[in-house]
Every structure is written in C-alpha cells, then in structure tokens.
C-alpha cells in the first residue's frame, strides 16, 4: 500500500516523532489531518497540534484503532510497557514501525499478538533537518507493499537503505552514532584552524561547510572518496602534507575501530535490554 490516503499514528512525539511529522508534511505525503499523535506530555501534543495542525489523541489505544501505520517513537526503556498497552488493539489492519534503537524485532514481537505486521527501522538524528540516513530491516509476515510504505515514510526525512536485521548493529554503529563522529571531526578541524590563527566562528563556518560540501560532492558525482582526495592533492602541496599527518595519526584505522567497537556495544545492549 502507499502511504497516500492512510492515517499515520505516532506513539511518542519527541524529537524523532516531530522530525518525521515535519518530513511527511514537507514532502506532502499525507495531509496534517491524517497524522495523529499521542505522548505522555500533554503540552508537547498541544504544541505540535498548533504548529503542524495534526490531530492529538491522548488515548494510546484509540490512536492504534485510528491509524493504518503506527510509528513507535518512544525510548527503548519504555517500549515494553507501551507494547503491552497497545497489544489488545493491534489488528491485521495495523502496520507497526519501531524506531527504538537497539531493540530487536524478536523482543518487540514477544509483547504482541502473533502475526502482527512489524518493521524495525533505524533513522538518525539528521532527520531533524530532513537529511537522515535510515536503515529498514526486512521482516517476515508483512503484506505486499508494507516495506515500500515504510520506505516512503522515511524517504521523506532523508536517504533509506533496506537490509537484513542482523546488520542493524552495524547500522547503529555507523549511521546511528555517526553524527557524533562527524561532529568530532568538525570540532577538530575548527580547533586546527583556531590553532593556526583563525577566529572560532570563522573556523567553524569553514569546517562545517567543508564537510557538507564534500558530502554533497561525493553524493552528486558518485566519485570514490580516494578520487576526490586525489583531485585536491597536488604534488608536494599542502593537501598531501595534511593527509600524511592524518595517516600518522591513524585517522582511518581509528574510524574503522570506532565502528567495530560501537557494533559490539550495540550487540551487547540488544542482548541485555
Ligand atoms: N533521536 C535520535 O537521534 C534517534 C535516532 C535513532 C533512533 N531513535 C529512537 O527514536 C525513539 C525516540 O527518540 P527521541 O529522540 O524522539 O526521544 P524523545 O525526544 O524522548 O521522544 C519520546 C517521547 O515519547 C514520550 N513518551 C514516554 N513514554 C511514553 C508513553 N508511554 N506513551 C507515549 N509517549 C511516551 C516522551 O515523553 P517524556 O520525555 O516525558 O518521557 C517523549 O516526549 C527512541 O526509541 C530512540 O532510540 C532516536
């Protein structure tokens, strides 16, 4: 099914819930009258109702009854309680989508009636500016078109990949945690600029725009990062002097190690949660 003409419900209307609501409306995928949200914070619902014209529904079970697609956007630690509350109201009409980081589908299914349509998704914080990197885990027991519906929703807030659930820990480590790594790189670049005499604001502007522009260049040209590096590096020039310093510091090895360690941590948390 396409999301057009359907009602989308949000259980939890925090940062990620709002980002998705904004994305759906900006992309014109669904009208505000077809978005309904619930949250334990009444003032938060009121704010979203005023800002986006969406429907609020304080009663979580009523929301599940009204929505064709229900996006579970609460923190992982309250997910079990939420699932227990909604389970009696979940029917064959309901497509459930969990965005809880690190919570495996099997753990979600354990709280729900057999045969529910459930998809696990991992977006990242850049959804707030409609530039998320999102992974959708393939799932059994879906209706034809369910995966495409979920792709449509998350496509409204950025880029989407579809893969096997066993790869979700690597996704969490790369794109889930990735904004923090890139923020460190940007901070480091700016510190370097300040160290060499630039004022902080100028250094930050140059560092942020350099990362943004490089990412866009790679996306739009399809160039391999090595080709882009070669294009910038002239023989005996400044870029190779900088690249040599980064190789001395083990930048690429450190990034590979970061993804490996974060993947292991995600696996541990998934087992213990
Ligand atoms: N933010 C990200 O970058 C990111 C990235 C990937 C995945 N995720 C996942 O997205 C989910 C939401 O994250 P978030 O950053 O949007 O969190 P958030 O800002 O804390 O939003 C969650 C909202 O749900 C509310 N809530 C708590 N218990 C509830 C209940 N029983 N029924 C209805 N609403 C309830 C919270 O209220 P209180 O604040 O009063 O508890 C809050 O307003 C999490 O599972 C997270 O793992 C987030």
Image (tube, grey):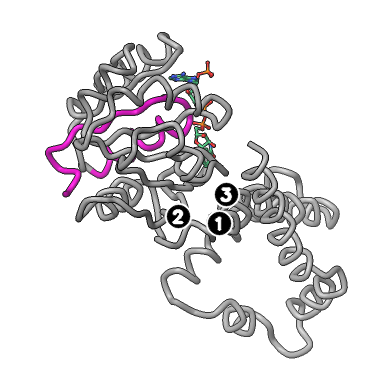
Query: Between 173 and 33, which is closer to the camera in this rendering?
Result: 173
- The image position of residue 50, as x and y in percent, is 30, 16
Q: Residue furthest top?
A: 42
- The image position of residue 73, as x and y in percent, is 44, 32
The residue sitting at 30% across, 42% down in the picture is 115
Which stretch appears magenta? 1-27
| Mark 3 within 8 Å of ligand 1, using the beta carbon | yes
Q: What residue is pinned by disc 3? A: 176
The residue sitting at 63% across, 79% down in the picture is 229
Do labels 1 and 3 touch, CB within 8 Å? Answer: yes
Q: CA distance from mark 2 to mark 3?
A: 9 Å
Label 3 Cα neighbours within 10 Å, binned few <14 / some 14-19 / many ≥20: many
Do labels 2 and 3 touch, CB within 8 Å? Answer: no
> Secondary structure under badge 3?
helix
- Look at the picture and state if 17 lies above or below 41: below
Label 1 Cα neighbours within 10 Å, binned few <14 / some 14-19 / many ≥20: many
| Mark 2 within 8 Å of ligand 1, using the beta carbon | no
Label 2 Cα neighbours within 10 Å, binned few <14 / some 14-19 / many ≥20: many
Do labels 1 and 2 touch, CB within 8 Å? Answer: yes
Instruction: Point out the tag, 2 or 3, that comes first from the N-terminus.
Output: 2
Q: What residue is pinned by disc 2? A: 135
Q: Is residue 88 left or right of residue 224?
A: left
> Secondary structure under badge 1?
helix
Q: Is residue 17 magenta?
A: yes
- Look at the picture and state if 90 lies above or below 151: above
Instruction: Point out the tag, 1 or 2, that comes first from the N-terminus.
Output: 2
The residue sitting at 43% across, 23% down in the picture is 84
């Amino acid at each position: 099914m396409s999301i057009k003409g359907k009602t989308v419900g949000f259980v939890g209307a925090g940062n990620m819930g709002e980002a998705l609501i904004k994305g759906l409306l900006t992309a014109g995928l669904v009208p505000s009258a077809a978005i309904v949200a619930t949250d334990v914070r009444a003032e938060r619902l009121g704010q979203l109702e005023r800002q986006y014209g969406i429907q609020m529904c304080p009663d979580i079970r009523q929301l599940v009854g009204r929505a064709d697609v229900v996006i579970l956007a609460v923190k992982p630690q309250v997910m079990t309680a939420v699932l227990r509350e909604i389970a009696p109201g979940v029917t064959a009409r309901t497509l459930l989508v969990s965005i809880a980081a690190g919570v495996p589908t099997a753990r979600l299914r354990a709280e729900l009636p057999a045969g529910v349509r459930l998809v696990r998704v991992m977006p990242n914080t850049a959804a707030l500016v409609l530039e998320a990197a999102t992974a959708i885990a393939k799932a059994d027991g879906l209706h034809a078109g369910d995966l495409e519906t979920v792709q449509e929703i998350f496509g409204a807030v950025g880029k989407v990949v579809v893969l096997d659930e066993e790869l979700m820990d690597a996704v969490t480590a790369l794109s889930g945690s990735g904004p923090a790594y890139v923020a460190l790189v940007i901070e480091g670049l700016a510190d370097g600029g300040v160290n060499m005499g630039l004022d902080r604001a100028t250094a930050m502007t140059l560092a942020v725009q350099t990362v943004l522009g490089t990412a866009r260049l790679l996306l739009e040209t399809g160039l391999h990062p090595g080709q882009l590096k070669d294009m910038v590096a002239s023989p005996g020039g400044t870029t190779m002097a900088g690249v040599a310093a980064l190789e001395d510091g083990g930048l690429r090895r450190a990034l590979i190690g970061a993804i490996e360690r974060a993947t292991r941590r995600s696996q541990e948390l998934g087992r213990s949660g």
